[in-house]
């Protein structure tokens, strides 16, 4: 694209250059966060990864907040336009490491860093936002354009050959502010790139539709962590820097299931067992439990399988318990630090306790349970009946007693007991005496009504004998 000079001149809106020429480094920007440096960016539509290409315009706080950019002369601008004019769907672009201004179209069978899905000409858009005199779009607006245009462009380009869960990211490449202002460049390129370490792009060979898009990395790769969300970034970083996961290997499910994607449960069991073995081999002679980390793996969905993704990555890490991930420093095979502290291994457990045989359960006699249930039901019924009987035998003030009166068998000089019921704590309510309804009669404070059929009188006791004589007191001697 452009042969950027070693000390690029700051570009101002009026076309004048500042007296000083601070050296600035080209790079790749992630997550659309602005910095005071000028970088070549490639904006990613998925996940908010923003990377812009060739020339970038970013606020320069060192220049009082004014826009700064690269200046390479008219010859360089013609090369920019030539590359963008000839890059069409299916073209592959490559550039030297950290020098995206030197991008050129290459054969896709060789190493490249960007595959074009579709060229978007902003001149065809209505309105004046992209007109000849319009100001260049801000990085936030470019990211919005990428999300609006590039996602659908990649879907049209790859169809069902694109794995949305794979390692390639949907991106947008643009020529930058200088080409926008001075040469009227309005073409942007939607495509795919492979994020790499230090916000750079990894080189890959072949068309995306023809390669395995599985999100796998070599064993020993550490994946970064977003400090704002404590989530893995899926971007390789140096293991000495903060990271969330350490890759221990990969599992190729196509070797086990050549006929097609297996069911989720079967797939999960196979991946878990295989990843455990791969991790043990990676950590040997260490044991995973001594690192206090957890085995992390995923499964493959049907759309990913149909797109050609047949591998899953095995990793180790640990969560915080609130949905976030712990921050790791250094490799698990070295001086590992978890959230700033070394891991505390759990006490060793003898092998015989780890592999204890299963204890068989005694057979369950269902017939006994049914009989027991019937017995329990009978006992419950009896208890209920007894409770009802007890409640009916309990008498509160104003209620009739259900207990029959006992007849005395001893002689008594008292008057015979009149027939009828004996009432405790007063007479019963007016509507019931015992179990028989009471007909209308005199008020309750009067004598009780006569019974319909009076009972036989009680037998009379023996006649009283003569009174005993009273003896006078004996004389005192």
Image: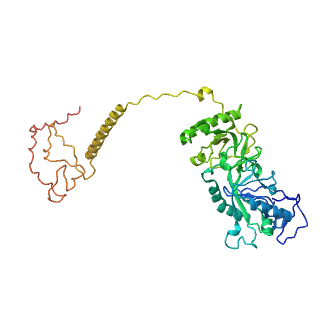
**Viewer-side residue, 432 vs 83:** 83
Residue at 62% x, 57% y: name it.
Answer: 156
Q: Is residue 233 visible?
A: no
Q: Quadrant of residue 279?
A: top right
Residue at 86% x, 64% y: name it.
Answer: 73
- Which image quadrant: the C terminus? top left
Is 248 located above or below residue 42 in the figure? above
Is 59 located above or below residue 370 in the figure? below
Residue at 66% x, 59% y: name it.
Answer: 150
**Viewer-side residue, 289 vs 30:** 30
> Residue 208, how many percent across, how many down?
68, 49
Q: Is residue 387 left or right of residue 153?
A: left
The extreme right residue here reads 19
Snapshot colouring: rainbow
- Which image quadrant: the N terminus? bottom right
> Residue 135, how many percent across, how many down?
75, 70
Q: Quadrant of residue 467?
A: top left
Q: Is residue 81 left or right of residue 152?
A: right
> Residue 190, how many percent across, how many down?
69, 58
> Residue 265, how many percent across, how many down?
54, 40
Q: Is residue 455 visible?
A: yes
């Amino acid at each position: 694209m452009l042969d950027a000079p070693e000390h690029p001149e700051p570009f101002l809106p009026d076309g004048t250059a500042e007296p000083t020429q601070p050296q600035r480094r080209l790079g790749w920007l992630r997550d659309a966060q602005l910095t005071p440096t000028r970088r070549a960016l490639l904006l990613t539509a998925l996940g908010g990864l923003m990377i812009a290409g060739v020339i970038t315009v970013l606020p320069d706080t060192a220049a009082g907040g004014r826009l700064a950019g690269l200046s390479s002369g008219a010859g360089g601008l013609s090369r920019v336009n030539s590359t963008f004019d000839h890059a069409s769907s299916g073209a592959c672009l490559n550039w030297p490491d950290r020098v995206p201004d030197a991008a050129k179209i290459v054969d896709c069978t060789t190493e490249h860093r960007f595959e074009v899905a579709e060229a978007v000409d902003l001149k065809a858009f209505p309105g004046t936002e992209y007109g000849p005199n319009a100001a260049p779009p801000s990085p936030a607006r470019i990211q919005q354009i990428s999300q609006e245009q590039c996602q659908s462009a990649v879907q049209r380009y790859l169809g069902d050959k694109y794995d949305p869960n794979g390692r390639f990211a949907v991106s947008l490449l643009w020529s930058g502010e200088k080409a926008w202002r001075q040469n009227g460049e309005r073409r942007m390129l939607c495509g795919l790139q492979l994020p790499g370490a230090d916000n750079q792009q990894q080189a890959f060979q072949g068309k995306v539709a023809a390669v395995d898009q599985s999100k796998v990395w070599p064993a020993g790769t550490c994946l970064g962590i977003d400090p704002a969300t404590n989530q893995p970034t899926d971007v390789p970083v140096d293991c000495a820097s903060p990271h969330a996961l350490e890759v221990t290997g990969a599992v190729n499910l196509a070797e086990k299931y050549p006929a097609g994607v297996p069911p989720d449960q079967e797939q999960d069991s196979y991946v878990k067992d295989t990843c455990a073995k791969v991790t043990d081999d990676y950590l040997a002679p260490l044991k995973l439990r001594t690192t206090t980390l957890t085995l992390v793996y995923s499964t493959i969905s049907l759309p990913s399988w149909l797109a050609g993704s047949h591998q899953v990555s095995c990793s180790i890490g640990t969560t915080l318990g609130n949905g976030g991930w712990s921050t790791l420093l250094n490799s698990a095979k070295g001086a590992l630090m978890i959230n700033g502290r070394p891991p505390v291994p759990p006490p060793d457990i003898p092998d015989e306790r780890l592999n204890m045989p299963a204890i068989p359960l005694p057979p369950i006699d269902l017939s006994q349970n049914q009989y027991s249930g019937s017995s329990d039901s009978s006992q419950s019924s009896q208890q209920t009946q007894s409770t009802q009987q007890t409640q009916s035998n309990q008498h509160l003030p104003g209620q009739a007693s259900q207990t029959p009166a006992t007849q005395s068998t001893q002689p008594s000089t008292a008057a015979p007991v009149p027939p009828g019921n004996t009432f405790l704590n007063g007479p019963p309510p007016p509507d019931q005496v015992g179990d028989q309804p009471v007909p209308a009669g005199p008020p309750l404070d009067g004598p009780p009504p006569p019974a319909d059929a009076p009972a036989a009188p009680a037998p009379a006791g023996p006649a009283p004998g003569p009174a005993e004589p009273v003896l006078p007191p004996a004389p005192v001697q």
